[in-house]
Image (cartoon, coloured by chain):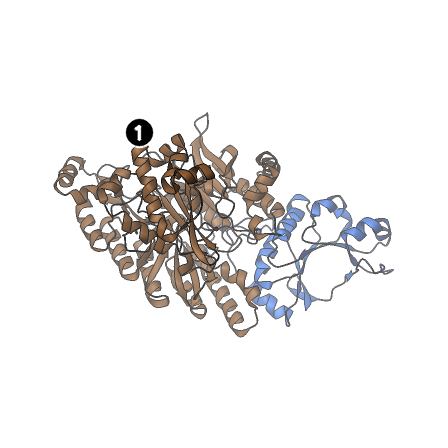
Amino acid sequence: MGLIKEGKLINDPFKNVSDRETVPAKGPVIVSIDQWMVRRDHLLKRSDLIGIWLKSDEHPETIAGDLAHLSLVALEFSSFRDGRAYSYARLLRDKYAFSGEIRAVGDVLLDQLHFMVRSGFDAFEVKNENPLDAYNIAAADYSVWYQQTGDGRLSTAELRDKGIRR
Amino acid sequence: MYRYDEFDHKLVQERVQQFRHQVKRRLSGELTEDQFKPLRLMNGLYLQLHAYMLRVNVPYGAMTSRQMRKFAHVARTYDRGFGHFTTRQNIQYNWIKLEETPDLLAELAEVEVTGIQSSGNCVRNITSDHYAGRVKDELADPRIYCELLRQYTVLHPEFSFLPRKFKIAVTGSPKDRAAVALHDIGLRMHLNDSGELGFEVLVGGGQGRTPVIAKTIREWLSPEHLMAYVEAILRVYNLNGRRDNIHKARIKIIVNQFGIDRYRELVDQEFDRIKGNIRGIPEAEIQRIKAYFSPPEYEELPDFTDKLSMLRLADKAFDLWVSSNVEEHKIRGYAIVNLTLKAPDRVPGDITATAMDAVADLADEYSLGEMRVNHRQNLVFVDVKQVDLHSLWQKLGLLELATPNLGQLTDMITCPGLDYCNLANARSIPVAQDINKHFVDVDRLVAIGDFTVNISGCMNACGHHHVGNVGILGVDKHGTEFFQLTLGGSSDEGASLGDRLGRALPQEEVPAAIEAIVDTYMDIREDDERFLDTYRRIGMAPFKEAVYGSADTKVVA
C-alpha cells in the first residue's frame, strides 16, 4: 500500500480525518464533504492545506464554489466498476479548472490507471504489495490514445495531422 | 475499407500485451475472478455454460477476405472448427481456453480485428448498414463516421465503466438496415431544410427485458459536432445512469425516468459547454479516413439486365435466388449478393472454418476481396459483376450459402439459446429447425414474402424477438420450456415492438401456431401487403383466434 504521485512513491502529507475524529491543530487534512460543510470556517482559519473526499455518489458540483480553498480532491471508487469518478475528474479539470491534486482512492485497480491519468487524476492510493513496481508496469501499458481529454496529450488524429509518426 | 496505420497497430498490440499480463495474473491467482471479470469482458471473453466464449468485433460489419481466412484459422486452431455470426456484426467462438486467448488475440490483431469492448459496460462495436457505400438512396457513407466513432470510443478514458453496455448504430440511408431505433444512440443521416447533411440523433432505444424504441433527442446535428454531442450524451449517462440494479442501468431507463425533454436539456447544457473546447477532429484526419472508403475502381460494364433475364427464365432456382438474395447496386453492371447462413438444417449464423475459407476465396474472385455481415446473421458480397451472378450462385450452392430465403420466414434470427448460453431459459436453435421443417415449400415462402421471425431463448432478447414480425421468446415454466409469441415487431424505419399474442406455447405447438398466423395473413391481406402492414391494419384478433381458437380469444381479449 502506498501513495503514488507524479510517478513517485511519496509519504502522504495529508491526514485523513474521519467524521468522528477531531481535526488536528496543524497539518494538511482530508475531510468528508459533510465535515467540510460543518467545519468550513474552522478549517479555513487553520491555514493548512485542505482536501475533500468525495464518495462515488457525491458530485463535485457541490464544492465547485469552494475549489479555490482546496488543494486536493480525493475521488473514491466505491467499486472499480463504478465509473463516475472519471467524469468527476474531467469536470474538475475542464469545467471547474481545478489545478490541485486529484487523488484516486478506494477500489483503485491499476489496470485502470491509464483511464484515471487521462481523465485528470494525478495521485493514486495503490494497495499492491509493491506499489511502485505495480504502478510502473501499469503505466507502461499504453503509449497510444485515440481521444482528446483535458490532459493536453495529443490524440492520434492530431498526431497524424501533424505528421508525427511513431 | 479502413486500414490500420502504425498508431492503430501499436494500440492493439499494447492491448494484447496488457491482456496477456492480466491472464497471467489471473492464472497465478494474483487477480480474483471478480477483479478479472471486467478485464476479460472488455476483451470480449465471456464464461459460458461449457467454456469461455470469445466475441470478436467486425467493425460496422465490413471485412476483407484476409480477415475471413483468419477467422477460419482461429476456428480451427482455438475452437472446434466453426464460428457464429451474431446480430451485432460480431463473430463468436464458443469453445475457447483462457490460457490461449492472448495468442488468439495477437493473431487477430495481425489482421486488424479485436475483441476490445465487444462486451462489458462500455461502448460496443459500432454497427451500420451492411450495404453502406453501395446503394443509390444513401446520402453519405456511414462507415466514415463509424470509423471516427470507433476510434473515439476504443479505450475511452472516461467511458469504459458506464452503468451498463452502450450500443451505437449509424445509417446513411433513409431505408434503415441498421435498426438505429433499437440502440442506445442511433444516428440517421438526413438533410436539413438548408440541404446540409447531418444526423438525426436518437437516444434510449434497446431490447432486453425492457424494450424501448429510441426517441429523437436532436433533429439535426452537424457532423463536425458529432463527437462533442456523443460525449455529452455519454457524460450525462455516466453520471446519472442507475448503478443499483443491473436491469435498470441502461440509458433507456434514465431517459424514460427523466423524460426526453429533461434529458435533452442536460445533454444540451453539456454540449454547449464542451463543443467549443473540444479540439475537433482535424479535417485532414476526416479526409484520411474518407479516402479509405472511396469507391473501388469499378469497370465500365454494359447493363446486363436483359441477359440476366434470359438466364433467370432458363433456370427457376437461379431466378428465385436472384429475386430473393440479390440487391441492386448503385453502379451499372454490378450487384449486391447476400449469402444466407440459413440453410434449413443449419444453426442460423453458424459457419464452418472450411466454409469461411471458401467464402474468402469467392470474395477474392467475385467481390474485390471484401464482404459484410448483417444484423440478421447473413453475409454480403457488395461488389459482384452481374455477369458473374450465375457462376457465383452455383458455387455458393455447393457451400449451402445460396438458400433463396433472404428476408423470408425461414431467414430467422436466433440467439445461441440454452444449447450454449448460461442466461437462457430455453433452447432457440431447435425451435428454428422445427419451423424450417414446416416451411419447405419454396413457392409458398415466396408468396408469403417479407416475414421476419426472431427467436430469443430468454428475456435478454439477443435474438431480437421484440422486433420480429413474429417474435418467439423462450420462457421457463416449472422446468419446462415454453414459447411466448409476439406479433408486429419491426426494426426498420418506423420501428415497432411486437405485441403479445397470448399464453405461451409448448415447443411442439410453435410451428403449427406460425402456420395458423401465416394462413390467416394470406387470407386477409390486400394485394401485395406485407405481413407487418396487414397486422398494423387489422390488429391482433384474427391471429389470436387462429392460434388459440375462438373460446380462448374471448377470454384473453
B419 horizontally vs A16: left or right: left
| Residue displayed at 36% across by 47% down | B376
Q: Chain of mark 1?
A: B
Give the farthest residue toward the top. Answer: B193
**Considering depth in this image, is A18 or B230 the residue closer to the camera?**
A18
Q: In front here: B428 or B258?
A: B428
Residue matched to label 1 = B526
Mark 1 is surrounded, within 10 Å at the Cα level, by few (under 14), some (14 to 19) or many (20 or more) other residues, namely few
Q: Is residue B417 visible?
A: yes
The kind of residue on which mark 1 rests is: Glu
Chain B: what color?
A: brown
Q: Is residue B470 left or right of residue B24?
A: left
Q: Give the blue chain's letter.
A: A
In the rendered image, residue A160, in percent from the top left (x then y), is placed at: 46, 49
Question: What x and y, as percent, mark residue B200?
Answer: 48, 34
Horizontal and vertical percent position of residue B104: 40, 65
Residue B235 falls left or right of residue B45: right
